[in-house]
Image (cartoon, rainbow, N blue to C red):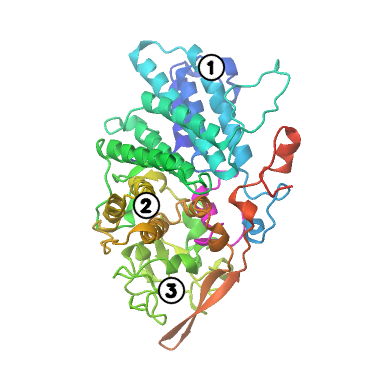
Amino acid sequence: MKKILSILILAGLVLSISSCKKDFLEKKPLDSYSDADLWKDLNLVEAFVNSRYTILPYMESSGVIKSYFMSGACDEGNSKHSYGNERALETGQMGPDNTVYDFWTANYQQIRNLNIFLSKVDEVPAQGPTNEAKKKRLTGEVYFLRAYGYFDLLRHYGGVPLISKVYGLSDTTFKVARNTFEEGVAFVLSDIAKAIDLLPANYASDVANTGRVTATAAKALKSRLLLYAASTLHNPANDQAKWQAASTAAKEAIDFAENNGYALFQGADYKNIFVQKNNQEVLLAYNFSNVPGGGIDIVCQPNSYGGWSVYTPSQAMVDAFEMTNGKPITDPASGYDATNPYVNRDPRFYADVLYNGAIFKGTGVEVFAGGKDSPQGPQGWNATETGYHWRKYMSETIDMNKEGSNQNMIIFRLAELYLNYAEAEQALGRDIVAREFANKIRSRASVNMPAITESSAALRDRIRAERRVELCFESHRIYDVRRWKIASVTENKPLMGVTVTKSGSTITYTPKVVRNRVFREEYYLWPISRAEMNKNPLLVNNPGYN
């Protein structure tokens, strides 16, 4: 039910199917289709929509993946090569002339294409009930994708211009002022409602369309949007009505998902949530194209296994995993031993992080000085800077010389909805329900951690800690610390790692500073680039960016 199609490959298949209907000699080259051709052929329209799915995991024309880029820009991880200019964010140099990533351009380019579809879809011929159903489904997908694009803009910039028309040659101006954040939320909710009305709950019996967005995914997006809108960054007065809206949306999404075949993963091996495509927890994901030398594995795996160690966990992320008794490592009663730091930890630690001595692909990881995954090992220039690597999402069977990653990058899964609901319920003072849903995650077979028992502010902090661990490396943490308005604490400290040394049978772990980091108050929102500001004098940048 949850297996995801590679959208770009699917687009090619759709084009091939369309062309096979004609005599071979009558076929047009694929780069010769005109705008008029496109909107007369429903299969070409489907290919057009398929190519818009890249709005979900990608954030720039280079096709990099949000999950690992955003992990390297916050306290859960490191970005060794600063591919997205993360270093400007870390050092306090981000601004309109030195942007980090380009969410604005990437999203608005896709939104323009989605608006074109909505302006043209009524004229697309669709004879017969099958084609009418396809046309309806594609329209629902476009409303969802536009909602997702605007949500992504809202979480980075706050209020943005809401553009739902396609500008033409007869238009005298393209200049549009920013709408408020609240207006943006209302706009996205409207698109989500339309998507829910037009999309099926799942594709359990429709293999050909498995992997497309569904009404379930749309409800998950609504939950995430309203949780952000209720949080401190956008709700400084702590309006309880906003928290109630977030709670209602989360519970509706949970009930809808579970009534349509989704459930928390209950297998014995937690890491299979992220490598097993057919699991019931994933509500929406995006598949990598299997291109040799590409994908998340080569970017994140250790150097002796052929990886580049570009995005790696921080010491702060490692320290966030509790001991098996449910106590943080800072608690004197936890049993934590700094000389043997990786024993008796939350089972999710072993599924998410590769550390010195961890078994991966049948051998032990060796980040100690002189080890095979150290700077002195094979391809030592690709060694980790933090002393750790991702295990979440990593394939143990891939041959990176012959194939690329083909895992599904998760966009929504049921565990997030449980945590959304727990957070909203706690904010409303309903601690019993909040604990219940947080503990559903901790009590699953592959985790089996002690129940959370706290109340009030202490419970809030435990739910936040649970979210940090459960959703690590899934492009949540960087937004969570901003919407909670705690990034000035979590991001305003050195990025730490570990130096591992080995002398005979004795291994020593010494904390090290990988890089000093600075967080400026204006970084709770992203700057609009100077280039965009120059194009549109009606734009006003976010506070602190001159």
Residue occupying image coordinates x 67% and y 42%:
528
Kindly identify the amino acid type of the residue bearing the numbered disc 2: Phe
The circle on residue 236 is none
Disc 1: which residue: 120
Cα gap from disc 2 to disc 3, whole angstroms: 22 Å
Residue 378 visible: no
Residue 424 magenta-highlighted: no
Q: Looking at the image, is mark 2 or mark 1 earlier in the sequence?
A: 1
Of labels 3 and 1, earlier in sequence is 1
How far from the left and from the top, in percent, is residue 474? Answer: 45, 52
Q: Nearer the viewer, mark 3 or mark 1?
A: 1
- In the rendered structure, are the residues bearing label 2 and label 3 in contact, judged by CB atoms less than 8 Å apart? no
Can residue 496 be seen in this snapshot?
yes
Q: Is residue 74 highlighted in magenta?
A: yes
In the figure, is residue 137 to the left or right of 379?
A: left
Mark 3 — residue? 356
Label 1: which secondary element:
helix
Residue displayed at 44% across by 28% down: 141
Q: Tag 1: Cα neighbours inside 10 Å, few (<14), some, or many (≥20)? A: few
Please report the bounds of the magenta region as a residue range. 59-83
